[in-house]
Amino acid sequence: MTETRDNSEKPTSRHAVTERRKCYEMEQKNGWTLLRIEPTRDKTLKYNCVFEGETEFPKYMED
């Protein structure tokens, strides 16, 4: 998920996780820059990892 609030802000991406440490693991594994971790109100996906720019997971299963 990518969003931009206005032209002065850089785009960010959010990925929901069950544990905070997963944000750091995603950052390390994918080479993304983690900006912050935001709590959610979801009981399962408790945190949003906010990364700099547009981020996508590798496509492991192509048609």
Image (cartoon, helix red, strand yellow):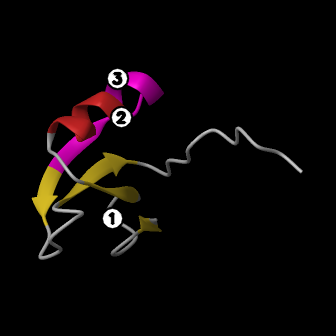
Please tell me which residue lies in front, 38 or 45: 45
Label 2, label 3: how far apart the Cα atoms are: 5 Å
Residue 7 shown left or right of residue 41 in the figure: right
Callout 1 secondary element: loop
Callout 2 secondary element: helix
Residue sitting farthest toward the front: 44
Name the image quarter holding residue 42.
Answer: bottom left
User: What's the residue type where badge 3 is placed?
Assistant: Gln
Callouts 2 and 3 close, C-beta under 8 Å:
yes
Please tell me which residue lies in front, 11 or 50: 50
Residue range of the region highlighted in magenta in the rendering: 27-36
Residue topped by disc 1? 8
Asked if residue 32 is positioned above or below residue 43 in the image, the reply reads above
Q: Nearer the viewer, mark 2 or mark 1?
A: 2
Residue sitting farthest toward the right: 63
| Mark 3 neighbour density, 10 Å: few (under 14) some (14–19) many (20 or more) | few
User: What's the residue type where badge 2 is placed?
Assistant: Met
Q: Is residue 31 magenta?
A: yes
